[in-house]
Image (spheres, helix red, strand yellow):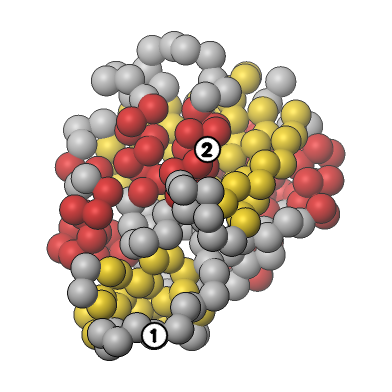
Amino acid sequence: MGFSIEAPRMIPWKEIDRAKVPGNEGEVILLARGEEFSIRTSGTELMNSRIHGSEESLAELALSRLDPKVNWQILIGGLGMGYTLAATLEQSGSDAQILVAELIPAVVKWNQKYLGHLAGIPLEDPRVRVTQEDVVKTIGKQRAVWDAILLDVDNGPAGLTREANDRLYGNSGLKASFDALRQGGILAVWSSAVDEAFTGRMKRTGFKTKMVSVRARKSGKGSKHTIWLGQRP
């Protein structure tokens, strides 16, 4: 996810930690300012603890479209600050199984050490497992297994690490997600912007597709973000 960095307040940002992105020359940086946290890369803010409404909407919009059933199997690509995971847990039953695929080990560590309280310590829920790998690999391991795949990677289909995103959001990546879903399953994709070409790719892959505009904040304020909802017929 991503959005413009707001002008600094009176309290200065303090760097907590930084880490390399596996398979990429870039790095991510964790900063804090009072009770506020920010994760950035190359001067761009990827996520902020004050602005997380659209991440929660990603889970809420996707799971509300599933038929009520026991033992939902849900894959989340990208842990972030845990808000999408927390919303997924809130929408899921006690027998759901949720796997989070996070590429950057430091992001998992930051959630365990610094950020967990922000979203209610979702990693400690017994329904959750974490795998530290590229979600592309996770998706490709099994067919017709997931009820929902929720993707919040970079800025979306036109994100920061474009080459890596092509493997996830290009034709082959969408086909892999389609095959990995059960019939009636949902692929939900977060993006900082509209991308009509991506809508077309989803439809050509076979998804029954809807594009939804949501606000960055639950209050209905903030910049507009885009969520694609693709259902496997």
| Rendered residue at 78%/46% (across/down) | 199
Q: Is residue 58 visible?
A: yes
| Rendered residue at 54%/75% (across/down) | 4
Q: Position of residue 149 (x, y in %)?
A: 52, 38
Mark seen at residue 31: none
Q: Amino acid at mark 1?
A: Pro
Q: Residues within 10 Å of mark 1 (few under 14, many from 20)?
A: few
Q: Position of residue 39 (x, y in %)?
A: 37, 72
Instruction: Decide: is 160 above or below 226.
Output: below
Q: Quadrant of residue 30?
A: bottom left
Q: Position of residue 65 (x, y in %)?
A: 57, 23
Under circle 1, the secondary element is loop
| Rendered residue at 68%/26% (across/down) | 232
Q: Amino acid at mark 2?
A: Ile
Q: Real-space Cα distance between discs 2 and 1?
A: 35 Å
Q: Which residue is mark 2?
A: 149
Q: Which residue is mark 1?
A: 8
Q: Quadrant of residue 107?
A: bottom left
Q: Mark 2 or 1 closer to N-term?
A: 1
Q: Position of residue 73 (x, y in %)?
A: 42, 27
Instruction: Decide: is 95 above or below 25.
Output: above
Front disc: 2 or 1: 1
Under circle 2, the secondary element is strand
Q: Residues within 10 Å of mark 2 (few under 14, many from 20)?
A: many
Q: Is residue 106 visible?
A: no
Instruction: Decide: is 191 above or below 158.
Output: above
Of the 4 image quadrants, the one containing the C terminus is top right
Q: Nearer the viewer, residue 28 or 64?
A: 64
| Rendered residue at 39%/35% (across/down) | 88
